[in-house]
Image (cartoon, rainbow, N blue to C red):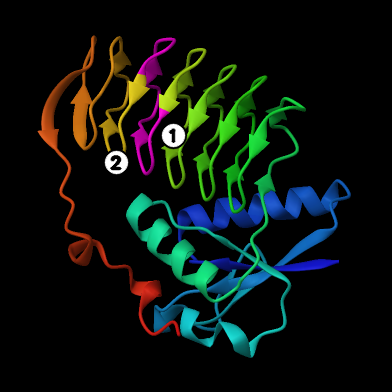
């Protein structure tokens, strides 16, 4: 049985824990054993019956076989993924039993596929991606590492989503469009043409109204400090 540590203990981490528990119930050879989070006030508390074991820096004090990151912010999730990878940690894929994934779809390590998500034929999903509840990733999509497809978002066929991009709740991306790296598509937006890297777009049709800040230091995560 593969023992899995969840990095983070917030709302998304609890969704990840629930997915892993549902997987275990339906016969998957893995089980979550607890959360790691730097918030000292959470130490010893439980989420979904699983303990908050300690800070991320104490990761090697526990017996486990693999990890998965339960943090929604894409830049934070990327930084932690890269550091854990440098430390030689193994990642699992969390795939809810109700998700539908085509047999030939490629799913990267550390990806979370939530309840009722659909991943169709020929899709390629990068590492550390979130495919959230009820999203639709149509045929031959390419989703870059650390991206997030939010609940209810729909990507038409042959869509490309760049690294770290976010397709917001209920957004629609028409076939063959590209969403640039680290860009944000607002909730409910309809993308009818390519979106450049680092843009924020919203509306119907989606239009730019801002540029994402790239100052990673300002986005440094709580749970990142002190990891060796």
Q: State which mark lies toward you, 2 or 1.
A: 2
In front here: 92 or 38? 92
Q: Which residue sits at x=33%, y=55%?
A: 75
In front here: 7 or 147? 147
Image quadrant assignment for residue 166 = top left
What residue did someone put label 1 on?
150
Which quadrant holds the C terminus? bottom left
| Secondary structure of the residue carrying numbered label 2 | loop
Residue 168 against residue 38 in the figure, above or below: above
Asked whether, in this view, residue 37 is left or right of residue 219, the answer is right
Whether residue 171 appears in magenta in the rendering, the answer is: yes
Q: What percent of the width, then of the height, locates residue 157?
A: 52, 12
Q: Which mark is residue 189?
A: none
Find the distance from the CA under tag 2 to the CA under tag 1: 14 Å
Q: Residues within 10 Å of mark 1 (few under 14, many from 20)?
A: many
Q: What is the magenta range?
A: 161-177
Q: What percent of the width, then of the height, locates residue 165?
A: 35, 38
Q: Which residue sits at x=66%, y=85%?
A: 62
In front here: 22 or 213? 213
Q: Residues within 10 Å of mark 2 (few under 14, many from 20)?
A: many
Sequence-wise, which precedes: disc 2 or disc 1? Answer: 1
Q: Which residue sits at x=56%, y=27%?
A: 134
| Secondary structure of the residue carrying numbered label 1 | loop
Q: What percent of the width, then of the height, locates residue 99?
A: 69, 32
How many marks overall? 2
Which is the main secondary structure of the residues drawn in magenta?
loop
Q: Which residue sits at x=21%, y=16%?
A: 203
Residue 73 against residue 115 in the figure, above or below: below
What residue did someone put label 2 on?
182
Residue 116 against residue 214 in the figure, above or below: above
């Amino acid at each position: 049985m593969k023992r899995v540590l969840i990095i983070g203990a917030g709302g998304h981490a609890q969704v990840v824990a629930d997915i892993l528990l549902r997987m275990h119930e339906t016969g998957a050879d893995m089980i979550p054993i607890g959360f790691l989070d730097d918030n000292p006030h959470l130490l010893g508390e439980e989420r979904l019956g699983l303990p908050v074991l300690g800070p991320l820096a104490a990761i090697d004090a526990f017996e486990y076989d693999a990890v998965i990151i339960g943090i929604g912010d894409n830049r934070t999730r990327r930084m932690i993924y890269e550091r854990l990878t440098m430390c030689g940690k193994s990642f699992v894929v969390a795939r809810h039993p109700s998700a539908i994934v085509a047999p030939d779809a490629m799913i990267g390590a550390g990806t979370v596929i939530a309840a009722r998500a659909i991943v169709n034929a020929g899709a390629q999903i990068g590492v550390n991606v979130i495919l959230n509840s009820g999203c639709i990733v149509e045929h031959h999509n390419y989703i870059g590492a650390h991206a997030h497809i939010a609940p209810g978002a729909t990507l038409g066929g042959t869509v490309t989503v760049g690294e770290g991009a976010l397709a917001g709740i209920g957004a629609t991306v028409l076939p063959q469009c590209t969403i640039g790296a680290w860009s944000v598509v607002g909730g409910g937006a309809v993308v009818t043409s390519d979106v450049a890297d680092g843009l924020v777009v919203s509306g119907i049709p989606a239009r730019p109204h801002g540029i994402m800040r790239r100052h990673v230091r300002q986005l440094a995560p709580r749970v990142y400090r002190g990891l060796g």
